[in-house]
Amino acid sequence: MDKTILPLHVTDLAFSAGGTNLIDGISFALEAGPRTIVLGPNGAGKSLLLRLCHGLIAPSSGEVTWAGANESRGGSDPARRQAMVFQRPVMLRRSVSANVEYALGLRGVSKNARQAQIDEVLSRTGLQRFARTPARVLSFGEQQKLALARAWALNPQVLFLDEPTASLDPAGTRAVEQIIAAIQSGGTKIIMTTHDLGQARRLGDEILFLHQGKLIEKTEAQSFFERPASNLGQAFLNGDLLW
């Protein structure tokens, strides 16, 4: 893998819409390695934070900086070394295999090299038997696996996941979590939102806890779940913090 684009530095990040501060002066740094889980009640700004970090939208103020991405010193282009999977993935009107191939083509992978990468990610996500199937006829769970396969094929250094199991049953959730673990084991940094505290306990190494657009806590997952440093964090774990 190329020189890492990490760490990610977020400095005084803010985003406003309609006169409302949706992200309000957030600062933190994320290193390579630990799986980062973004928690908070509905409306806390979790999904918006991921989109800002991924560069899908521009902040109203503040900065998102990939400290390792200094191309003049041999660093990587951060836009080409990260990927994102959404809660409701968009499937192209083509086969499962062609969905992955399209992503590889956009990334500039040669045609001769694409098939081996397609076969590998479809096999590792359990989708090989659907290779010629139109992606839009797959079940929602299989579509989410395809979205992960499509991102995995790009060999990202950082993978943003926005509630990837929100609409899945327990079996589908387990399958997706296994894929996420496999991607992480290959060296990809996982930054993920979830509303599922059980999932956060299973997958999280560190927690970013948001409330009303503010970063309340950044801490190791075990510390957050056992001894949250804030009253808001404790209220959230107790199920008392709804908005």
Image (cartoon, rainbow, N blue to C red):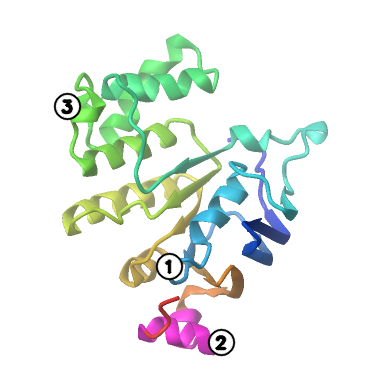
* Tag 1 residue: 42
Decide which of tag 3 and tag 2 comes sooner along the chain.
3
* Tag 2 residue: 229
In the rendered image, which quarter is residue 12 located in?
bottom right
Judge whether residue 12 is colored magenta.
no
Per the image, label 1 sits on a secondary structure element best described as loop
Q: Is residue 188 visible?
A: no
Residue 71: where, in percent of width, then height? 77, 33
Question: Looking at the magenta stretch, what is its main secondary structure?
Answer: helix
Residue 183: where, in percent of width, then height? 41, 45
| Magenta residue span | 223-239
Residue type, mark 1 in image: Asn
Q: Residue furthest right?
A: 72
Quarter of the picture containing the N terminus is top right
Residue 78: where, in percent of width, then height? 65, 38
Decide which of tag 1 and tag 3 comes sooner along the chain.
1
Q: Residue furthest top?
A: 112
> In front: 16, or 179?
16
| Left or right of residue 82: residue 90 | left
* Tag 3 residue: 129
Per the image, label 3 sits on a secondary structure element best described as helix
Mark 1 neighbour density, 10 Å: few (under 14) some (14–19) many (20 or more):
some
Q: Are marks 1 and 3 in contact (CB under 8 Å)?
A: no
Residue in the image at 24% along x and 56% along y: 174
